[in-house]
Image (cartoon, grey):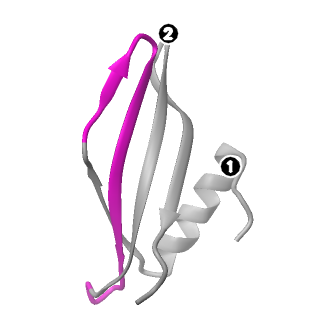
Amino acid sequence: MEPVTSHFGVVKVHEKMLANGLGIKPSTDEVIISCNFAVEPGTVEMSSKQGKVYTKAQYLTLWKKIYRGWKIYRDVVYVFPAE
C-alpha cells in the first residue's frame, strides 16, 4: 500500500474501509503534552462486520497545537502481520 500524504487521501482510505464493513476500535495508551505538541501512542483492532478481529496495529499520532485547538501533525501506523 502506498503512503497516504494528504487529508483527502486519508478521508478516502477510511471511507473505503468503512464502506466494506471494517470495524475500527482504537485504544489510546497515554497522551504526553509538551509545549505545542502532544504524542498519543496506542493500539487499534480492525474487525469484520461479524465482529471477528482480523488484524491489530500500533499507532503513534503527533498533535500540534494551533490557534483553533489541536491538529494531527503526523500519524504513523504499524500493522502486525496476519497470524
> Residue placed at 35% from the left, 62% from the top?
44
Disc 1 or 2, which lies upstream in sequence? 1
**Residue drawn where x is 51% and y is 57% of the image:** 77
Whether 73 is drawn above or below 69: the answer is: below
Viewer-nearest residue: 73 or 50: 73
Residue 55 relative to residue 16: left or right: left
Q: Is residue 65 above or below residue 62?
A: above
For residue 34: magenta? Answer: yes
Q: Can you say whether 69 is above or below 83 in the image?
A: above
Tell which of 45 and 68 is nearer to you: 45
Location of residue 53 in the rendering, given as x and y in whole percent from the top left corner: 30, 82
Q: Residue at x 28, y 89 (%)?
A: 50
Quadrant where the C terminus lies?
Answer: bottom left
Query: Please, what is the three-letter code of the amino acid marked with disc 2?
Result: Tyr
Three-letter amino acid code at the position of disc 1 = Phe
Image quadrant for the N terminus?
bottom right
* Number of other residues with Cα within 10 Å of mark 2, as a class: few under 14, some 14 to 19, many 20 or more: few
The residue under label 2 is: 67
Magenta segment boundaries in residue numbering:
30-51
Q: Which residue is mark 1?
A: 8
